[in-house]
Amino acid sequence: MSHSEILNIGIIGAGWWATSAHIPEILEHPHGQLVAVQCRTQQKADKVARDFKVEHAFTSVESLLALDGLDAVVIATTPNVHYVQAKAALEAGKHVLLEKPMTFTVAEARELCELADAKGVQLLISCPWHFTAHGIAAREMIHSGKLGDIRMMSILMTNPIDKLLTGVNTTPTHGMDNVYVEPNKGSYNDPEIAGGGQIYCQVSHAAAYITFLTGLRPTEVYSKFDYAGSPNDIYDALTITLDNGCLVSLASTGATPQDERNYEVRIYGTRGILLLELWKGTCEFIPFEGERERLPELDAEDIYPARCPARNLIDAALGLAPNGSSGRLGLASMEVIEAAMQSAHSGQAVHITQA
């Protein structure tokens, strides 16, 4: 495609996250044009359209998808409707940026990936961690063989969202001061809407990141959850086996003090260890032989590049850049989530069959 082309984009679910991250990026991108928004009520849709100077405001997803000249959509709704809305958009031949968790099931995620391939359109999962300079550098180190064979990983992911998961709060409190349109009550704490607690809301990030970094897929998951009296899991512990035999220990909780947030990834190879502290913006390679290599610390605004997924949607759809967070990563994440849910329920390890 010509670099002079413009991608006409619609937002499905123009709530707090879309108005905080996706819409500002689309409005500033030289090749993006926001032509329509959709919300649950016409009042909210009209407000977003008016404030961001968007021509069309809908309550109906079908009406938005039928808009002449629409090229792509961002789906930032609750997880329970991701599959139906993404399928409709892909069937209509639209490029899709889909919030995580991708779907409720592996079968749904796989179907969306196959549909995107069949239609020849881009399907992206909104995982900002896939766009940090450190994450990209770490992936290059791993794929170049600098770490040798990857034998073990440990991941610790904690963040202060337990009040969302338990329903005490209905609005995000983890650093977002500009909640423009409040989430629907139950968006985070109702399993019928959110799928689950920490496993769907946050472990979905880490599970996708494993495959993003290594290119490896999960083959077995054993997990235990602590619900702490909530309808949702608050404390999650997973042991994951990857398809090369690599062992992954993943621990995650949403119950931390407001200013205490961690996302640590340690990758153990036969030639060295890679240490990433994502919320601190640090990355260090420690070889068995030779000097340590520490990458420059990231600036605060680059630690969690929330606007990058929308930017990449435009660039990938127009052929300006590769897809940096493909639907296949969302599928790998769903394989871990679904197996972890089954394992926590049964008390047994769950084997993952790759289609």
Image (tube, rainbow, N blue to C red):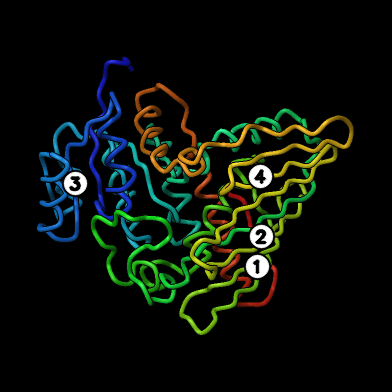
Instruction: Answer whether labels 1 and 4 touch (C-beta < 8 Å).
Output: no
Residue at 65%, 63% in the rendered image: 251
Q: CA distance from mark 2 to mark 3?
A: 37 Å
Q: Which amino acid lies under the numbered mark 1 shown in the image of this protein?
A: Ala
Q: Disc 3 designates what residue?
A: 37
Between 21 and 344, the one lying in front of the other is 21
Instruction: Kindly identify which residue carries mark 2.
Output: 250
Tell me the tag on residue 276. 4
Query: Of the residues under marks 2 and 3, which one precedes in the sequence?
Result: 3
| Label 3 – label 1 distance at C-alpha | 38 Å
Q: Bin the neighbour count of mark 1 within 10 Å (Cα to Cα): few under 14, some 14-19, many 20 and up.
A: some
Q: What secondary structure is found at the residue carrying circle 4?
A: strand
Distance from Cα at disc 3 to Cα at disc 4: 37 Å
- Disc with the residue nearer the chain's start (3 vs 1): 3
Percent x, y of residue 53? 13, 39
> Foreground residue, 55 or 261?
261
x and y, in percent, of residue 86 in the image: 33, 49
For residue 129, above or below residue 27:
below
Query: On the image, numbered disc 1 is attached to which residue?
Result: 237
